[in-house]
Amino acid sequence: MSERNDPRTIFGWAMYDWANSAYITTAAGVLFPIYFASTVVPESGITVLGRTMDGEGLWSAVVGLGAFVLFLAMPVLGAVADRSGAKRRFLQAFAYSGAAFTILLVFVGTGQVALALVLFLLSFVGFVAGNVMYNGFLPEITTDDTIDAVSAKGFAFGYAGGGLQLLIAVGIIALHDRLGIDRLTAERLGIAMAGVWWGGFSVFALSRLHDSPTPGGERPGVLATARAGFGRTISTTRHLLGFRQLLLFVVAFLLYNDGVQTIIALTSVYASQTLALSTETILVTFLVVQFVAVFGAVAFGNLARRVGPKPAILVAIGGWVLVAVGGYLLPEGASGAFVGLGAAVGLVLGGVQALSRSLYGSMIPQAASAEFFGFFAVFSKFSAIWGPLLFAVVDTLTGSSRIAIVSLVAFLVAGGILLAFVDVEAGRSSRDRWRVGEAELGVAGT
């Protein structure tokens, strides 16, 4: 069983963030979307259901489909992992399979759209599902006084690992002539390296993590576990409405995370089209964000120890408001200022992500941690829908991406206001009244 506040266990847990962040940073975040849209999909596009879609449109549609499937599956999967006492085994399966499918992307060539999408979706499922298990360990290996710092440590390791692997990939691409390979081969190698990094470091991380025993010491069968997982998920969803503080936090998170995720997702497009910046400048800025985020996560972890996680998150949200306004004010071609704004993003990125995870983790029942972090993954995916939609509507109506980017402040402010009303102590005390797996899950109204 994983020990609480054990340095070896915590280091191993954080190293999984170091491992899988290479995938989301290099493969899914930067290189593969560009490679897919510019190389895999023909210039004439692909006909889907009688309509021709270009690379960008097809990519968005498939990623959305994958998010919808995960939206349905993750809470149930988390419930199954909790009941079976097998979070580590699930994490191992998803990490290794996700890494393998990432490595296989190296074999995708021009015109192989179906193969590219299948391999990417399988790797993405491995990443998201693995994160549900990984996050589920957090309340088990910490206590209330250490959970914020440990969560921040995990993100700091992730930013460092993802940034270092991206730096190596960018180096291979920049030096492809000296290495005797063409640029496309260098890009494919950079993508595959992310899978090798993910799988390799996962071996070490998993060696430090252990499953907790199930009640009674027995592991139920697969079908019985699946049925119980579905039933428990439905029951938890129904009773969640009775726990006001946890529900209020979830709604607040949906709003401010929507603003944050939309800014992150649209940064490269906004920089290239509205600010007319070069690809090299954008890549450098992504690296700056990754490495500054290491210090940002640690800094906000320290701030949370002094003032509490909620005030620290509010400070980070304020920083994101300034980032959105700064993006609106940046003049075209201002590469230096854009890199500086990227440094500001790195500073506040860890504050929102790490502390939101730890605050949520401190208000959920430990016995259902994977199930509830399954819901947390769903919240993150669901909240990423509305910001891009608002951006598209405002951009269309006004003809200005600058106005569209600053309109995202509405999500940040609304989420911050709701978060200010969350009673953290009441939320933490209410978790003790959850009777997981029973017909009634505690005393509602707290």
Image (cartoon, grey):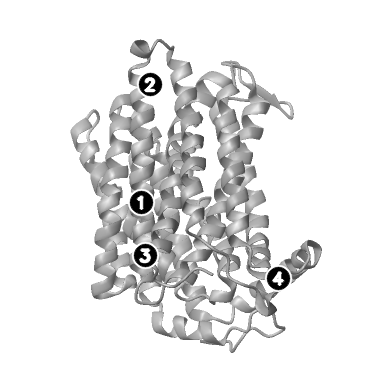
Rendered view: 421 above or below 134: below
Q: Position of residue 255 (x, y in %)?
A: 45, 61
Quarter of the picture holding the N terminus? bottom right
* C-alpha distance separating marks 3 and 1: 15 Å
The residue type indicated by label 2 comes to Ile
The residue type indicated by label 3 comes to Pro
Residue labelled with disc 2: 173
The residue type indicated by label 1 comes to Phe
Q: Residue furthest bottom?
A: 443
- Measuring 70% from the left and 70% from the top, which residue is drawn there? 234
Q: Earlier in the sequence, mark 2 or mark 1?
A: 1
Q: Position of residue 250 (x, y in %)?
A: 49, 68
Would residue 339 appear left or right of 391 to someone viewing this image? left
Q: Kindly indicate whether the residue at mark 4 contacts the one at mark 3 (C-beta within 8 angstroms).
A: no
Residue labelled with disc 1: 157
Q: Kindly indicate whether the residue at mark 3 contacts the one at mark 2 (C-beta within 8 angstroms).
A: no
Residue labelled with disc 3: 7
Residue labelled with disc 4: 234
Query: Dot 2 surroundings within 10 Å: few (below 14), some, or many (20 or more)?
Result: many
Query: Dot 3 surroundings within 10 Å: few (below 14), some, or many (20 or more)?
Result: few
1 or 4: mark nearer the eye: 1
Rendered view: 46 above or below 137: above
